[in-house]
Each structure stands twice: as structure tokens, then as C-alpha cells.
């Protein structure tokens, strides 16, 4: 004869199992009151109990009956408790799923495997209650159902690659070498941040808050609370506002316990929105500035693919530095260097000859704004490893520019703000290495620019933004009589 406790357990198991199956069948007609929505959010708090009990019970059925664990796994009370807790957890999960934002196929696998686990545990409770021992393979079935249910729940929460990511990282997890001059603001600076900090909750498998961030359409559309950003207004954008809330706040994003945005990442997102949230804007359109300068230093750049060379002597580098010449590595630990020559009262043209001592290490030479003349170009061509050269707003006339073609690795050449003519620039267009040529601020007529563009082929010519000369018709001014502060007379007596 069953004891009272066993009877209560059996009735509870039957009630919860029937309720679960009923709600699964008529799920689309469910309209949750607020209290059940709260219970749904308790699903993550209790889901470990049924997983542990089912796994232990399944294992107990696979080992010899003489062990203590096996004895526990062969009792009706054990399986009644397991079935009841599994059903209760599945019910809470069903309530939580009504909030939406989950991949339907994965969610169905999770729901129905949980229901099958509940019914399986209930069947074992019934069998042991009748004094009948089920076949050993029921232990294996319970373990398989537990693994399927637990794995699909993990996919819903963390994404499909979460389990195997440490040994099989996604393609996106592998840092790509970025050419800063060809980099796009969203694709190369913003999206990687969203990928690391937002995609786990806003992907095709789990669109939390009805927000999908893995596609451009999803990001532009926003979620259940509307657009997540307002172009040119970062401080009014949800993306920034939610990131700045206290981490304990339920509205804070990313949620507490998830990897948080760093200060540098938040600055990049803020800067992107402030500049209009343009999905196709080039990074080079905004350089140089402190925000993107920090980002550039944090990414694997094209310099990472450079040939290995020995570092220059620190003593030599220090000897070349001066009030108008600064030298620093292009990245931490890199033997390649960036040299910046300023317009300073101590400026000496011989600096470019002296730089020959570290010529193989100089990746970038920025001399824009310095009083460089045509005579110094010969010395500059001796910097054989040079990839980027800035000669904007200098005193060069253009007659010796052809010499720069001797720089076989030069990729970016800045000649903006000079007095160059088309005939001075044309010889450079035949270079096989130069990828981008900055020409804005030079007196080049439109017909010459068209000719240069035609000859430039795949070379990028940056001629700046043409001025807005449109004349707008304004309405005639209308004088209006201002309203008086007081519309009626006042009695001061």
C-alpha cells in the first residue's frame, strides 16, 4: 500500500504532466497574465535541478542494482520528484518562450524534448510504483533526452557555436587584417564590437526584444522599443543609453553577467552614431581623431602582414628625435615605425637624410604641414620600406614628384593642399603600388580631374567634398506684432 507522501507525489506528477501537455497543444491560444510572465523568468533559476536529477537517474539505471545510486534510481519517489520538477521547469520555460525572440526550430526541439523527458520520468515512476523494473535502455533514453534538451537550451541562450567554440572558433572570431585606408566604419570598427557583445542575444536563433543585430536590415529596423540609434544624436540613442545604465539595471545592455562594452568600444559606437551612423562611410574620412586613432592601434592592420625585420636600435631612434621629429612604433612590439615631422622653428631639411639610418623600419612618414621642398624628395625616396607618405600643405612644386615612384612599396600618398597641376600628378598614376592618392585642396579644374580619374584606373583619388553652392529660395520675412504680457487691464488699487 502506498504511503501518503508517495500518493501526493504521484498526483502532483500527473497534474503537472497533464497541464504541460495541454498547454503545449493549445500554446497559440495562451495569453499570459503578468504573474505567469514573472514565473517564466524563473526558468533559468530552476532548470539545473531537472537536468541533474534526470542525468543521475539515467546513469543509475545503467549501473548494477547493488550500488546505492542504482537503488535511488529504482524508486518510484525519485522519478516522481524528477518528473514533477522537470514538468514545472518546462512550464516556466513555456511561459518564458511567449515573450518571443527565439528561433522557432530550436525552441521546438527544446520544448518537446523537455516534454518527452517529463513523460519518460513519469513512465518510470509509474513502472516502479507497480513494482516492475523497466529495461536497462531506459537509462540511456533518459540521458539522451537530457543531453538534447540541455544542448538546445544552451543554443537558445548562447548561440549555436557556444559548445564547440573553444576548439572550433567561428570565422568571425579570427581577427582579419585590416587596411585602414580601405576600412569601413561600420564593417570594420562597429560590427566587430556588436558581434562580440550583442550577437549572442540578438541573432536569428534568439532575437531578444524582437531585435536582430546580425543583419543590416535588423539593426536599422530596431526592436520592440523602436530604433536603437538616432543618427547624429548618440546621447538620445537606446544603444548608448542602455550601455550607460548601471549594470544591475534590468534595461542595461549587455545584460549583467555577459561580456560588457569597454570604454574604448563605447567611444567607437558613440562616434559612429555622432557622425551619422553611415553604414558605408570609410574610416579614412574621419582620421585623424583620438577615437579612431585608439581603434586603429587595437586592430590587426595591414602592417601585420609585413616581412619580418630586426628592430632599430633604441639609441639610434632617440638620437634622431628632436623638437620637430617624433618617432614611435606603429603598434606595440612592432619593429616598424611611424615618423612625424612638424613645422617647427628648429626644422632642418637634413632630417630626411638622417632618417636613412632606420630606413628599413619606417612604415609611415607624415610630414604634412612641414616646410618640405622638392630638394628633400630624393632623400625621402631612400626610405625603401615606406608604405604611407604625407606631404600635404608643404612647399613642393610638383616638378620632382616622379621620383616618388622609386618607392616600390608606397600605398598611400597624401598631396593635399599644395599647388599641384594635373601634369605633375599624372606620372604617379602609373605606379603599381600606390592605392590611394589624396589631392583635395589643389587647383585642379574639373576637366583635369576627369582626366586623372580616367588614368587612375583602380587607384583611389581623394579630391574631397565639393562645396555646396545651391541657392535656396527663402520666404519673405513677415513682421508680427508681439503679444503683450497681459491681455487685460490690471487694477492696482
Image (cartoon, rainbow, N blue to C red):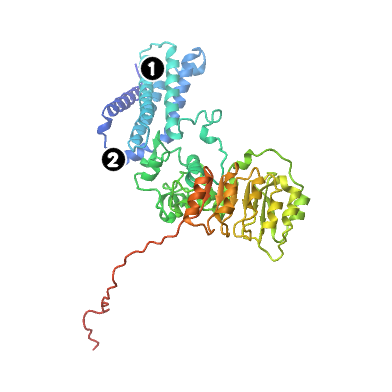
- Mark seen at residue 124: 1
Q: Position of residue 136 (x, y in %)?
A: 44, 11
Q: Give the Cα distance between marks 1 and 2.
A: 34 Å
Q: Tell me if 7 is positioned left or right of 379 in this view.
A: left
Residue at the farthest bottom position: 493
| Whether residue 88 is situated above or below residue 353 in the rendered picture | above
* Residue at 66% in and 55% down: 340
Labels 1 & 2 near each other (Cβ < 8 A): no
Residue at the farthest left position: 488
328, 435: nearer the viewer: 435
Q: Tally the marks.
A: 2
The kind of secondary structure element at disc 2 is loop
Q: Quadrant of residue 375?
A: bottom right
160, 406: nearer the viewer: 406
235, 73: nearer the viewer: 235
Residue picked out by circle 2: 33
| Residue 346 visible in the snapshot | yes
At label 2, counting other C-alpha atoms closer than 10 Å, the crowd grade (few under 14, some 14-19, many 20 or more) is few
The kind of secondary structure element at disc 1 is helix
Report the quarter where the N terminus lies.
top left
Q: Position of residue 204 (x, y in %)?
A: 40, 34
Amino acid at each position: 500500500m502506498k504511503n501518503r507522501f508517495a500518493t501526493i507525489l504521484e498526483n502532483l506528477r500527473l497534474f503537472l504532466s497533464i497541464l504541460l501537455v495541454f498547454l503545449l497543444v493549445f500554446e497559440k491560444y495562451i495569453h499570459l497574465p503578468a504573474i505567469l510572465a514573472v514565473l517564466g523568468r524563473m526558468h533559468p533559476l530552476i532548470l539545473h535541478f531537472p537536468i541533474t536529477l534526470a542525468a543521475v537517474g539515467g546513469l543509475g539505471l545503467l549501473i548494477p542494482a547493488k550500488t546505492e545510486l542504482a537503488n535511488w534510481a529504482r524508486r518510484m519517489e525519485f522519478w516522481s520528484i524528477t518528473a514533477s520538477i522537470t514538468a514545472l521547469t518546462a512550464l516556466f520555460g513555456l511561459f518564458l518562450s511567449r515573450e518571443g525572440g527565439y528561433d522557432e526550430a530550436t525552441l521546438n526541439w527544446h520544448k518537446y524534448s523537455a516534454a518527452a523527458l517529463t513523460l519518460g520520468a513519469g513512465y518510470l515512476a509509474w513502472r516502479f510504483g507497480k513494482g516492475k523494473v523497466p529495461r536497462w535502455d531506459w537509462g540511456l533514453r533518459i540521458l539522451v533526452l537530457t543531453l538534447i534538451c540541455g544542448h538546445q537550451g544552451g543554443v537558445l541562450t548562447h548561440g549555436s557555436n557556444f559548445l564547440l567554440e573553444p576548439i572550433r572558433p567561428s570565422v568571425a572570431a579570427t581577427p582579419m587584417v585590416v587596411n585602414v585606408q580601405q576600412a569601413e566604419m561600420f564593417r570594420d570598427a562597429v560590427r566587430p564590437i556588436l558581434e562580440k557583445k550583442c550577437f549572442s542575444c540578438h541573432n536569428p536563433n534568439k532575437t531578444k526584444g524582437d531585435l536582430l543585430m546580425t543583419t543590416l536590415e535588423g539593426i536599422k529596423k530596431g526592436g520592440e522599443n523602436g530604433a536603437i540609434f538616432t543618427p547624429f544624436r548618440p546621447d538620445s540613442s537606446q544603444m548608448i543609453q542602455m550601455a550607460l545604465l548601471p549594470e544591475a539595471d534590468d534595461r542595461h545592455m549587455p545584460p549583467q553577467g555577459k561580456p560588457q562594452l569597454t570604454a574604448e568600444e563605447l567611444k567607437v559606437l558613440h562616434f559612429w552614431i555622432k557622425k551619422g551612423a553611415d553604414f558605408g562611410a570609410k574610416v579614412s574620412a574621419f582620421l585623424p581623431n583620438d577615437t579612431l586613432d585608439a581603434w586603429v592601434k587595437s586592430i590587426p592592420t595591414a602592417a601585420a602582414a609585413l616581412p619580418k625585420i630586426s628592430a632599430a636600435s633604441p639609441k639610434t631612434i632617440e638620437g634622431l628625435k628632436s623638437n620637430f621629429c617624433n618617432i614611435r612604433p606603429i603598434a606595440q612590439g612592432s619593429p616598424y615605425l611611424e615618423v612625424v615631422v612638424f613645422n617647427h622653428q628648429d626644422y632642418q631639411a637634413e632630417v630626411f637624410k638622417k632618417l636613412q639610418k632606420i630606413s628599413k623600419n619606417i612604415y609611415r612618414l607624415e610630414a604634412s604641414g612641414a616646410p618640405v621642398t622638392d630638394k628633400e624628395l630624393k632623400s625621402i625616396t631612400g626610405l625603401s620600406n615606406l608604405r604611407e607618405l604625407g606631404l600635404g600643405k608643404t612647399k613642393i612644386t610638383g616638378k620632382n614628384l616622379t621620383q616618388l615612384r622609386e618607392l616600390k612599396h608606397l600605398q598611400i600618398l597624401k598631396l593635399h593642399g599644395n599647388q599641384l597641376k594635373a601634369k605633375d600628378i599624372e606620372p604617379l598614376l602609373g605606379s603599381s603600388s600606390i592605392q590611394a592618392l589624396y589631392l583635395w585642396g589643389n587647383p585642379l579644374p574639373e576637366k583635369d580631374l576627369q582626366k586623372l580619374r580616367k588614368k587612375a584606373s583602380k587607384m583611389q583619388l581623394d579630391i574631397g567634398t565639393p562645396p555646396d553652392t545651391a541657392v535656396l529660395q527663402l520666404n519673405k520675412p513677415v513682421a508680427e506684432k508681439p503679444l503683450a504680457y497681459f491681455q487685460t487691464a490690471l487694477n492696482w488699487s
